[in-house]
Amino acid sequence: MTSSREIPPDEKSRLQNLMREAFIPGMSIASIKNGKLDFAGTLGVSDVESQKQANDETIFWACSLSKPVFAYLVIKLIESGKLGDDFNLDSELWNTERFGERGERRPLTPRMILSHQSGLPNEGPPTFAFNPGEGYLYSGEGYLYLQKIIEERTHLSLEELAQQTVFIPLGMTNTTYLRPDAEKIAENHDEQMHHAQRLPTMIANDNNSAGSLHTTASDYARFLTACLKEEALNEMMTPEVSTLVDKDAADKKVNPEKLKLIDWGLGLGLQKPNQENQGMIAFHWGHGPGAKTFVAINRDTNSAVVYLTNSANGLGIAEDVVAPTVGDIHASMDYLSAKYGYQQHDSFEFKAAHPATEAKGIHSKTSELRLQWLDELTHAKTHPIKINKDKLKSYAGEYGPTFPMRITMQEDRTLQLELFGQKHQLIPISETTFASKNDLSIRLEFDKDKSQVTTHFLYRDKITQKLTVEQKQPNLNEKTKVTTNPSQTTESTSRRYKYDKRQVSSHFFPKNNKPIHPEDVQMTKSAFGQGSNLAKESAKSFRKK
């Protein structure tokens, strides 16, 4: 299986629209049909702040999608005999030093742990909420306990075992249970597309069978494709326990009608066949600070979908993303929504919780616009727009006086913008609109009839600000010598303006070359000319709440 099949244009557009509606910055996705990869790809940005674009090498935190991989690993280790002839899914694992005497309790087994029947908590001290095998309680602690037993038996770490048994044989070269280098990982984001809390570099996010997996959707699809071909998936998809005995769900008073549709197998939730003759669907979700993931498998149709997001809103699009390939997963999402509060992106509850609704104002309009601009820029990079050389040349020139900038024609017939001491290669979005290749916050719109250009600035949490200046010296190329300098005084027909590059650039482009929040911007008299209307209006608009 290869990962070279790109997302079809119509599907890509559909997914991008879902991401916009749900405020999701980046997503890695793969779809499998008839047991083979249908498509795989990555959309959006890995980091909203830097606007670093996500690509097929960007690694996402898979969160609890770690668990199905671990369940598969355990089954493969048992099949190979690497855990010893006396170890199987029903072997007793009770540890007296850890849990005390077992007494009248049933034996604690790998089967119970992998299907969340251990009675151990998701996190925290290893105390039993019920006797093993007598209920259901989602438990990461149980997975860690089984992991430690296997590591002690094999004298190998989880990462070593997974690499040897799963990742290397399946060609999962971008997958690890260890935390990858920071520059390779998609940054996680909260509901408002701001950075989520950074994950601790402790065991909870390193070499942890319950939740430390980092991967790409393309890699995870290799795992899914292997599962669809093997007996291991049948073992994983055999119902072991009903969520009617889900202790958390009972405590939260979840309607039993929702619970009776969901069972659990080994490492996977199981949505029972429905009345529309749809077969069983296996699923799992991942939940971490600023990261949500989902996988669904339909064994009857040999289909599966996995997607990974760097957003707390990621599960809001699960039904829309998965259903076209795998089938109706409403019962699964209904269960998760009732138990954990996840909401679909188009639900009233989701809209009410996000600031793009009428009740909460326009806080996130920039987030939507940012994604739109990113989509347009990405398309322009992959499908270049050809513009007549003479027209390009006509855009080159010195512009001012209130907002001095210089646009030059390069030898490769591209335009370069010089603004606030920074140089930006410009890429045409249309014949009159150009975007900075590496700075998503700047866009230019030319009006040759009026010999002027409007610069659009996009700031986090604020709607675009616009400044229009006239062309003073036309037809510049990169070899043109310009006699003006950044701090010279320029005469206007009615007023003198002074451009101080040091003051202006420090406000708009700090040393890290990222636009700062507009509320921190101070429009100075030296920057825009004492008493100028532009200075007053700009300062007023930037300070608006």
Image (cartoon, rainbow, N blue to C red):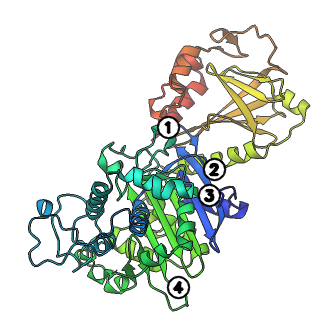
| Amino acid type of the residue that numbered disc 4 sits on in the rendered structure | Gly
**Which badge, 3 or 1, is on the more N-terminal residue?**
3
Residue that appears at 55% across and 90% down:
276
Rounded to the nearest angstrom, the CA distance separating label 1 from label 2 is: 25 Å
Q: Nearer the viewer, residue 234 or 375?
A: 234
Q: Earlier in the sequence, mark 1 or mark 2?
A: 1
Q: Nearer the viewer, residue 409 or 12?
A: 12
Which amino acid does the dot numbered 2 rest on? Answer: Gln
Asked which quadrant contains residue 300, the reply is: bottom right
Identify the residue position indicated by label 4 in the image: 279
Marks 4 and 1, the one that precedes in the sequence: 1
**Which mark lies nearer to you, 3 or 2?**
3
Quadrant for the N terminus, please. bottom right
Identify the secondary structure beneath mark 4: loop
Q: Amino acid under label 3?
A: Gln
- Judged from the image, the secondary structure of the residue bearing numbered disc 3 is helix
Q: Is residue 151 above or below residue 463?
A: below
Q: CA distance from mark 3 to mark 1?
A: 24 Å
Residue 344 spot, x, y in % from top left: 47, 68
Write down the quadrant of residue 53 in the picture. top right
Which residue position is annotated with label 1?
183
Per the rendering, the mark at residue 16 is 3
| Residue at image mark 2 | 372
Query: Mark 4 or mark 3, which has the lower sequence index?
Result: 3
